[in-house]
Amino acid sequence: MYKVQKVVGSWKLPRHTLWLAMLGFLPLISPGQAFCQSAAITVVNVYTQTAGNPPALVVEVIGANLLSPEPPRVLVFPSQGATVTVLDTSATAIRIEVTAPLGYTLSEVALSYSNGMVTKAATKTVCAKTDVQQLFFYIPESQVEKKYGHGVARSFDVIQVSVVNKCALPVLIPLAGIYWNGGTTQPPSYPLSLDHVTSIYSNNRQFSGPRAVYFNVVQAMATLGSAIEPFFGPGFTQGVAILGGGFTQASATIWKDLSAEQLQNLTTQSYQATEQIGPNGGSLQKFIFFPIEKKTKVDKTKTYNKNRFSTAAGTPLTLHMEIIPVITQPPAS
């Protein structure tokens, strides 16, 4: 029990008693400041819209108590040239739209309150051009013929594509987004799909290729000889038997059939319709096939330039390649 002292007509309480009383009444005087919890940002996701030139960014700020003590002012960094529009807000998510010049990369978001500021670095959802390293090599026709057969070497220019992804995100590179810009002298050239290349390969192996023509002729002669051998003597019959048997087998021994190996190379080494490369050092090495333009009877001046992919010494071959970052976490609804 505290002792109460009377001093000249007034009552005086001990000093520690006054402090306890003030602490007890503080929540009643300022309840908002006493019970509010600080805002916290967990993650900042950035998504690029598909429309617009340049397309705007949709930024999703995820956290807790984001509207406490009041709805904040949203700031983005770098701020130069960026315009922020708030789309919707809640205690756990704030979504904004950021319009900025071409090449803008959002690095940080800040929520400004009356009692301070909360910041968070943006999750990387874009990859810079320097993050995805690309190299292209022209494969000589002699090597293409050994790897993929005569028909492919005669019909296609083959380019080896080597890509190293140093971005923090996986990337998709569709075949439809790769092309060679012919410049002012030639139109752009686009690679063909694996299905188209294998159809050309199969046609060459079965019908139009040198090996196919040779063995088809030998087989036709043997069949024709068997049909007319009754009109000739025994020597002709023996010749037909040798042609359809030992001669054909000997020819196959000399001229090996490499179609199984070549078809496997073509299937496993060719660039698919879409290739995905993993993040942080993921790599890809595949081959793409550009159709060779032949001289036509209608336009005899249109001749194929054998050196269209050749470059000066020390100058790398350049192709256009569309790179699409893969965002694994979609925006919350």
Image (spheres, rainbow, N blue to C red):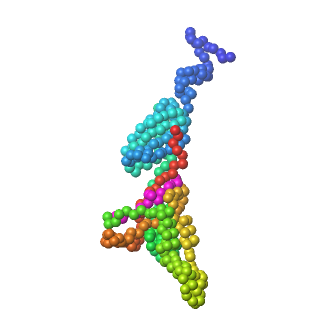
Q: Which residues are magenta?
A: 169-183
From this viewpoint, which residue is outermost toward the right? 1
User: Residue 300, position in %: x, y?
Assistant: 32, 72
Residue at image position (59%, 89%) is 234
User: Residue 269, position in %: x, y?
Assistant: 53, 66
User: Residue 63, position in %: x, y?
Assistant: 54, 38
Work out whether 282 lies above or below 67. Answer: below
| Count of all numbered marks drawn on residues in the image | 0
Work out whether 7 lies above or below 59. Answer: above
From this viewpoint, which residue is outermost toward the top? 9
Residue 163 in magenta stretch: no
- State whether residue 131 appears in this view: no
User: Residue 43, position in %: x, y?
Assistant: 53, 43
- State whether residue 185 appears in this view: yes
Residue at image position (65%, 15%) is 3
From this viewpoint, which residue is outermost toward the front? 231
**Which quadrant: the N terminus?**
top right
